[in-house]
Image (cartoon, grey):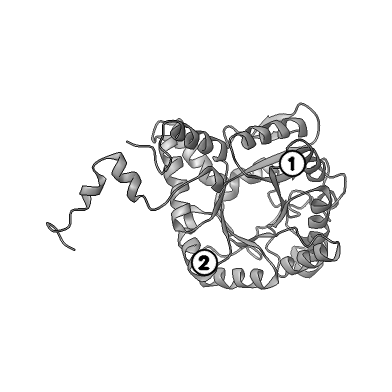
Amino acid sequence: MLFPDYRPRRLRQNEAFRRLIRETTLSVDDLILPLFAIGGRGVRNPIQSMPGHFQLSIENLVETCRKAYELGIPAIMLFGIPDKKDPLGTSAYSKDGIVQKAVKAIKNKLPELAVITDVCLCQYTDHGHCGIVNGHTVENDATLELLAKTALSHAKAGADMVAPSDMMDGRVAEIRNILDENSLSHIPIMSYSAKYCSAYYGPFRSAADSAPKFGDRRTYQMDPANGLEAIREVTMDIEEGADIIMIKPALPYLDIIYRIREEIDLPIAAYNVSGEFSMIKAAEKMGWMDGKRVMMETLTSIKRAGADMILTYFAIEAAEEIKSHESRGVRRITTIEA
């Protein structure tokens, strides 16, 4: 198919044609909104590096969830910021922990909104690592029991899905077993299967107060240079009982999303992380880019690579943009028309 016999521009010449042949559709149904719960009342602490996002006390969290639900966003991902921390992260699995309280409040007011909980210890440990520490070593096997206890406490509080993000080997099987043993076999697991040791997490670590107090997370999160290892990680998690697998971050790892999509038939989630969000917001503030167009192009690229769902701090903005186009009769949206 060569010019002049084939002229691709024939089908680009108007919006009707472009809509008819559009290959990738971004929907509100694809979006998951991450949120940060904190104790107290009337708390709405701005996250300076993530404009428009806040650490929210439970009543404010519920109102943000209500806005997301009314826009048609099907799910939120919940992170907790505890009142106190200790070496074993006991607040993570306390029945009165911030996440457990928040889950109950959200499900009481918005029972149809899916609440997914992040299962990790880093926000709750005084050393900031995702597991039990012995000296400067994060102990894999000793951590599994605490992660399982955390997941169980979330499920008992009413979480619809649990999402282990710690990257300890074997944690999916441990969580699956404890849920099944407690008559919670219906609770699915979204595993952070290919979670890379990324510099793109910086704004999140400030928001969640989860930066490690020593060293880094290279001994348990994946090396950014590796692709085949992601396939092994995903395969292990599926064999252990994961229902959805996640790749994190999204934009620097679109090739990984694509490769995993070619390998598996389970649903794939991709996390459009804080650094990806903050870079776009910063460039928009400087007047260097059209923020809305870049937002929609970015999310569409993640969907095009093979993700079935996208965790993104843009969820509310993107949902509003999609709804705006739908109200004008444009039901298949990728980027905003130039």
Res 82 visible: no
Q: Position of residue 47 (x, y in %)?
A: 63, 35
Q: Is residue 159 left or right of residue 306?
A: right
Horizontal side of residue 132 vs 293, given as left or right: right
Q: Position of residue 272 (x, y in %)?
A: 54, 49
Most distant residue in the top direction: 42
Instruction: State which mark lies toward you, 2 or 1.
Output: 1
Mark 2 element type:
helix
Looking at the rendered image, the quarter that the N terminus falls into is: bottom left
Alpha-carbon distance for marks 2 and 1? 33 Å
Residue placed under numbered mark 1 in the picture: 111
Q: Earlier in the sequence, mark 2 or mark 1?
A: 1
Residue drawn at x 78%, y 45% is 99
Front residue (pair 168, 307): 307
- The answer to whether mark 2 and mark 1 are in CB contact below 8 A is no
Q: Quick one: which residue is furthest to the left in this view?
A: 4
Say which amino acid is labelled 1.
Pro
Residue beneath label 2, please? 260
Locate residue 314: give its quadrant: top right
In this orientation, which residue lies closer to the viewer: 278 or 134?
278
Mark 1 residue element: loop
Is 254 left, or right, of 246 in this rendering?
Answer: left
Q: Is residue 144 visible?
A: yes
Q: Quadrant of the C terminus?
A: top left
